[in-house]
Image (cartoon, grey):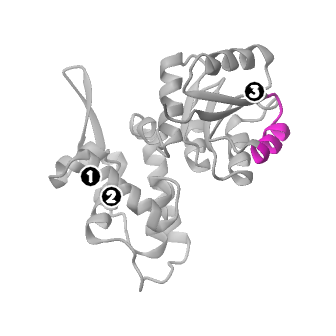
């Protein structure tokens, strides 16, 4: 049996905290290291127990759980954070992406889905990227930030570019908002091969997720986002009851 995933819970509301504890303890795939109600305790315990995944709920009156997750990531960068928000919103999803959160969900999530988020996040996957792609208007805001970064921050030395031509091609498609499957289809390779390339890109650029990889490439001048690559040019169509993404102008 694979080693159980070590989980720390931070949730200030006792009733919901007990519910999360019960949920985690029901699965042999997880090991609950601690459940606390205050962010300060979570920071201290994360340094002692080195959890692999931290579930972050409400932490204080009027404070977003995303802020708590960001604080935990600064103090304990090796842990994956999943935000379970009492008030889901697109603004909070956008903030969660910027904070490097691995997954974002509401309190109405069912147990199998939560288990899936934990397992995938523990392997280093950023499930939040899928959530971003389901909301094109949030994706547009992310790329707007990319453009602002490219315009206002000085470009770094372009002489050394650690990515291969194929990796740069894949990263260019990532910046257009395409999924691994869509990139694979466009390039004639499997989605698993794309995933392997993305993993290599993240390692070479020393970043945690696809968003940071694109920003890093923009800052170095290895990648540019032209008008033709805008996410707001991506339209969603319904095909046989399934959302299919198509890009205009290509």
Residue 151 in the image: state x and y as whole percent.
49, 70
Residue 173 forms part of the magenta stretch: no
Instruction: Residue 197: give its label.
Output: 2
Density class for disc 2 (Cα within 10 Å; few <14, some 14-19, many ≥20) is many
Tell me if residue 205 comes above or below residue 229 in the rendering: below
Q: Which residues are magenta?
A: 36-48
Residue position marked by numbered label 1 in the rendering: 193
Q: Give the farthest residue toward the left.
A: 188
Residue at image point 83% right, 44% down: 44
Is 151 placed left or right of 192 in the picture? right
Give the prevailing secondary structure in the magenta stretch.
Answer: helix
Residue 204 in the image: state x and y as whole percent.
45, 67
Q: Nearer the viewer, residue 216 or 163?
A: 163
Visible residue check, residue 30: yes
Residue position marked by numbered label 3 in the rendering: 11
Visible residue check, residue 250: no
Q: CA distance from mark 2 to mark 3?
A: 36 Å
Q: Secondary structure at mark 1?
A: helix
Q: Nearer the viewer, mark 3 or mark 1?
A: 1
Q: Secondary structure at mark 2?
A: helix
* Of pointers 2 and 3, the one earlier in the residue sequence: 3
């Amino acid at each position: 049996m694979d080693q159980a995933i070590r989980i720390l819970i931070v949730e200030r509301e006792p009733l919901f905290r007990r519910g999360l504890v019960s949920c985690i303890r029901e699965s042999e795939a997880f090991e609950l290291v601690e459940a606390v109600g205050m962010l300060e305790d979570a920071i201290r315990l994360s340094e002692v127990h080195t959890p692999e995944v931290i579930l972050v709920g409400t932490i204080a009156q009027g404070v977003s759980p995303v802020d708590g997750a960001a604080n935990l990531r600064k103090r304990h960068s090796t842990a994956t954070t999943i935000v379970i928000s009492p008030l889901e919103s697109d603004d909070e999803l956008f903030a969660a992406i910027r904070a490097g959160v691995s997954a974002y969900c509401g309190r109405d999530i069912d147990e199998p889905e939560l288990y899936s988020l934990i397992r995938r996040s523990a392997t280093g996957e950023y499930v939040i990227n899928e959530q971003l792609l389901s909301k094109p208007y949030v994706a547009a805001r992310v790329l707007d930030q990319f453009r602002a970064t490219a315009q206002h921050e000085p470009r770094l030395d372009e002489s050394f570019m650690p990515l291969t031509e194929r990796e740069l091609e894949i990263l260019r498609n990532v910046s257009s908002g395409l999924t691994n499957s869509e990139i694979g289809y466009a390039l004639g390779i499997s989605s698993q091969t794309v995933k392997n390339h993305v993993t290599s890109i993240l390692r070479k650029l020393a970043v945690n997720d696809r968003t940071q990889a694109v920003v890093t490439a923009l800052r170095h001048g290895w990648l540019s986002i032209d008008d033709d690559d805008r996410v707001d040019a991506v339209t969603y169509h319904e095909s046989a009851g399934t959302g299919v993404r198509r890009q205009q102008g290509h």
